[in-house]
Amino acid sequence: MSAAHDLRRKGRPPKTYLLLTDQKVRDYSEGTIPLPRGSMCSETQSSRNTAELVNVKVAMLEHDIIEQFDRKVLLEVPIDCVGLLEPLDPEDRLELLNNLEKLHNLPVGTPLWVRLGQADKLAEAELKYVGPMTTGSSSQFFGVELKGSAAGKGNGTGSGLFTCPDGCAAFVPVSQIAVRHWSSGDEPDGQERERPPRRIILRHHPSQSHPRRHIRPPLPALPAQSQSSGGSAEPAPTGTQHPFSVGQRVRVSLKDSTVSGEDTPAGNWDGHYRGEKLCQIPSALYAKLVPASKVSPEPHLHAIPPPQVLKSIVKTSPPAAKPGPASPTTYAPKVALLPPPQKSSKPIPPLPPPKLLHNPLPPPPPPPPKPSDPTAAVAQHANGAHRPPSPPGSPAVGNGEALEVGSMVEVNDPPLYGVIRWIGHIDGILEAVAGIELEQELSAGTDGSYLGERCFHCPPDKGLFVKLCNCRRDSRFPAPEARVNQVARCNSIAFAEWGSECVKDDTLPADGDEAKELYQGWKKGIQGHLNSCYLDATLFSLFSCCSSADWLLFWPSDNTRADQSSTRAQELLRCEIVNPLRRHGYVCASKTMALRRLLEAANGDAGFTNQEKDPEEFLNKLFLLLRVEPLLKIRSLTHKPQECHLYQLFPPHVPRSPSPPDSVMLPSPLFTPMRVASVQTLLESSFLHAGLKLAEGPSCLLLLMPRFGKDFKMFDVILPTLSLDITDLLDDTLRQCSICQALAHWECPECYEDRAITPGHLKQYCHTCNSQVHSHRKRTSHSPLEIGVPEGAFRGPLNLARQEMSLFAVTCIETSHYVSFVKHGPLASDWLFFDSMADRQGGENGFNVPLVRPCPEVGCYLSLSEEELGRVDLVSLPERARRLLCDSYMCFYYSPELSLYK
């Protein structure tokens, strides 16, 4: 059952997230798949509260893969906004997320601006519909009726979702709309407007003229008396000229004092007058509308040159109150950085139409110039402008502490609390600057923008820019654990409470109920640590309940210097891992780490101690380290036998798709029979099409399954064959005719796909049957091959015992994590499930808890034929049965007869 389906059935829809950074995942058919920031994913089934997990297992919506990510790189999407984000490009989703809740609840009839076709033109429209365009789709679009000059430029009359005049309907994603607000004197309705240019922050001076397409009438003068509530006095008449310019630093005379610069929060003006926006004011505490007669130039000694884009100067303000309920009147902390005024010789442009939330068509603006400081360049690259909250990166030092993006900090005293969302440099400030998303609103706060440049995203009035040196860790929480070397930490001292004993006495594996009693439960099996699941699952599969691989533990050495490392590895494997596992049912991760260190030293590959590996890579390196003979000897038609330790299966050219049965009631009208292949079919097909034969029967056979990405899977299910028949795959051995059971002398690869003759099996014939079969007109083009037969006279039917191998374990993979299923007894239900990292105690310096539990339910599915399994609804499969059948990675077989002689 799919994870999302299971969560919905429990009454809680799965949480949806956006990736905050670019990620890469590994797929076996497509290789490395890049996942751009903004990619959508939804949580998968979990037995615990996902809010408590450090890592979250999610299903990627665009690529149909499941992966596990750190919670810090995931941004949860409100459930009402998921449909709006789906039709957008990944990068657009992050830019728009903060404004979606407002747009999602727009009522029908809301006047809008929409972008149609041309990147720089806006068209007038009216909202008619919000929702999916087709039945069953979850992507939501805005259905609008085009107005004015845009009327007739649409398509149809609303597709049955709403009604409007013909040619006036349009469906656009949320990135192409903006709410239309216009004051009097603007451009007439119905005309397409130019996309507004980027604004720069200016202060208003009434003596400057503003070139417009439509000139607004001059603003009326304020009353002569001072306004008692606001403290603002009457400005000079509009036509009066004054020796001031926009951006100039001045002094203002108030009743009791004279203030200047940016140090006194004595203002109360937001830049508007009688509904008209005169200038951009970042905080009303630092602005005031006064008559020009009360303004005088500030001495040149304190003049500061105008800043560039994304520049700042230090702001100070009254102390902030203790943390409490959000209040719009809370003052900014003394360490806050507020945008300074900018000088400009250009007149103020007219108020343009509102800027759309995002415009994916024009090229993005150039990034700010790189600073000369090398550390600043890194900060700009990692957390520069036009970026959402960035993931934790290299720590920076703030207030004597290592702080990074994502650190929980406090500023000022009494403190204000928040999370660092951006770290960078600003001209005029030598130290690094941090952008903080506060827990409470500030009247001087922003939405993560500074001087019109987007540094990070946060709710309005919660963004604050401060010097990094003024930040300190949030004192309400304990200090984070110090980062340690996890490879060096994995030793008998740190893992003393999780340790396992050394057992030198050779121990045979338990069987049946005894094995079940020994292994089941928590802290059983092999403990995982630092990406060791590939090794844990493989060793548990090989040695826990089967002795077919025990020859590895006793392979003789010649006591040369070259064999010393092999001897140490063999003793470690036998006395520290296999024997304790069979005696006590548990092995500590420090023991397997010792083996990983030996593999690392022998191969010069540091990845064996801390990186993800594959079971086949581990086995190949282990067999080389132990200096043992290969398990397999495989001969091609024209070459000598080649030796190897395991074999990769390849799919047949045409997969067989079972047809639905006539007498079985299908679970639902949407039921589709699964594409199923058995290991028996895959093995025969691989050997047949490659022209291979086994030079001798193996005692142990390790088979790698063919794996593909979910979008390109050739089979929905691979059925591990319980008893694998290899008789017809052996070279130079007696084989029976497929028709009369006499001694076979001929083999025909072309007849393999012929279902008229023993379908699904290799075809070999005696002399008589070979002539008769290939005299048919459909088979005259076949080229049968002669089989090598041992010397001697053989007449009549042969009663030969088939050589078969038994399945004793299966290793599976899901989201880069390996688990194993092991058969522990003769009954069909005798199966164990093992996960070396099923749970965790502690944080980064904690411990994984392994788990072994019985899973008898998988036995009934393994006993089915390919045709019977193809009729099973995949959704109805139990979780562990689904993992075994759909995620199988390697199957382990042994020969009950030959393993005694190895």
Image (tube, rainbow, N blue to C red):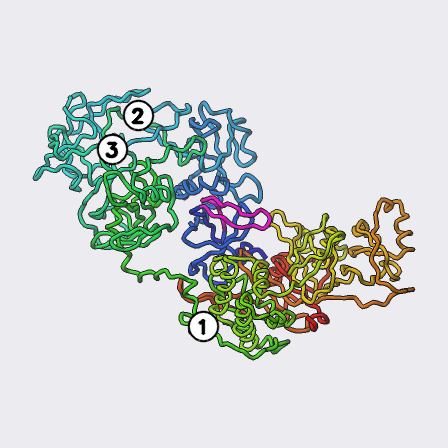
> Distance between the Cα atoms at labels 3 and 2?
14 Å
Looking at the rendered image, the disc whose residue lies closer to the viewer, 2 or 1, is 1
Q: Quadrant of residue 373?
A: top left
Per the image, label 3 sits on a secondary structure element best described as strand
Give the residue number, with chain letter if any, for mark 1. 498
**Residue matched to label 2:** 350
Q: Mark 2, residues whose alpha carbon is within 10 Å: few (<14), some, or many (≥20)?
A: some
The reply, left or right, for residue 119 in relation to residue 232 is: right
Tell me whether the residue at label 2 lies in contact with that at label 1, contact meaning CB atoms closer than 8 angstroms.
no
Q: Check if residue 594 falls in the magenta segment.
A: no
In this view of the protein, which residue sits in the foreground, 323 or 716?
716
Contact, mark 3 vs mark 1 (Cβ under 8 Å)? no
- The residue that disc 3 covers is 272
In whole angstroms, how far apart are the C-alphas of marks 2 and 1? Answer: 72 Å
Location of the C terminus (image quadrant)? bottom right
Spot occupied by residue 246 in the image (x, y as percentages of width and height): 21, 28
Magenta part of the protein: which range? 22-41
* Separation of marks 3 and 1 at Cα, in angstroms: 68 Å
Amino acid on which the number 2 mark rests in the picture: Pro
